[in-house]
Image (tube, rainbow, N blue to C red):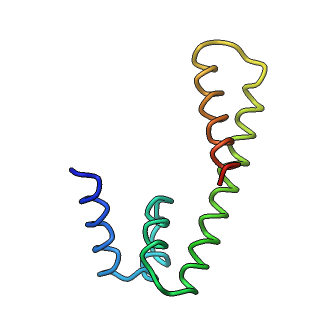
């Protein structure tokens, strides 16, 4: 499915169900939280979403740092892939 169409459909479903209900009852992917945040005018909701996103980013950063440090001295191609993945997560979080 076209990515824009998929995003538009998700947004319509979110609006129909209600942003607050969704946040209270479901685990929402970070990309969907960002989508909701970009498409709401409610300042309180934007602030709430910002806090959720920031908390998740911080958790991701802590977890990636921990996992990277566990693998730091190990060798092998699979380990290299994992270390690269965790470094990318760390770098992405530092950019945000």
As drawn, is 6 to the left or to the right of 81?
left
x and y percentages locating residue 42 in the rendered image:
50, 87
Q: State whether residue 47 is above or below residue 86.
A: below
Q: State whether residue 52 is above or below residue 92.
A: below
| Residue ranking furthest to the left | 1
x and y percentages locating residue 8 in the rendered image:
28, 66
Q: State whether residue 28 is above or below residue 1.
A: below
Determine which quarter of the picture holds residue 75: top right
Q: State whether residue 7 is above or below residue 1.
A: below
As drawn, is 96 to the left or to the right of 42?
right
As drawn, is 15 to the left or to the right of 73?
left
| Residue ranking furthest to the top | 76
- State the residue at coordinates (37%, 83%): 18
- State the residue at coordinates (73%, 48%): 62
As drawn, is 8 to the left or to the right of 48?
left
x and y percentages locating residue 70 in the rendered image:
75, 30
- State the residue at coordinates (33%, 71%): 11
- State the residue at coordinates (65%, 55%): 96
Determine which quarter of the picture holds residue 88: top right
């Amino acid at each position: 499915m076209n990515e824009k169409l998929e995003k538009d459909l998700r947004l319509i479903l979110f609006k129909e169900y209600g942003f607050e209900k969704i946040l209270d009852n479901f685990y929402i992917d970070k990309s969907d939280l960002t989508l909701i945040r970009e498409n709401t005018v409610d300042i309180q909701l934007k602030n709430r979403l910002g806090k959720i996103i920031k908390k998740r980013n911080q958790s991701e950063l802590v977890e990636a740092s921990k996992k990277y440090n566990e693998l730091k001295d190990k060798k092998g191609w699979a380990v290299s892939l994992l270390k690269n993945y965790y470094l990318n997560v760390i770098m992405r979080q530092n950019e945000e």
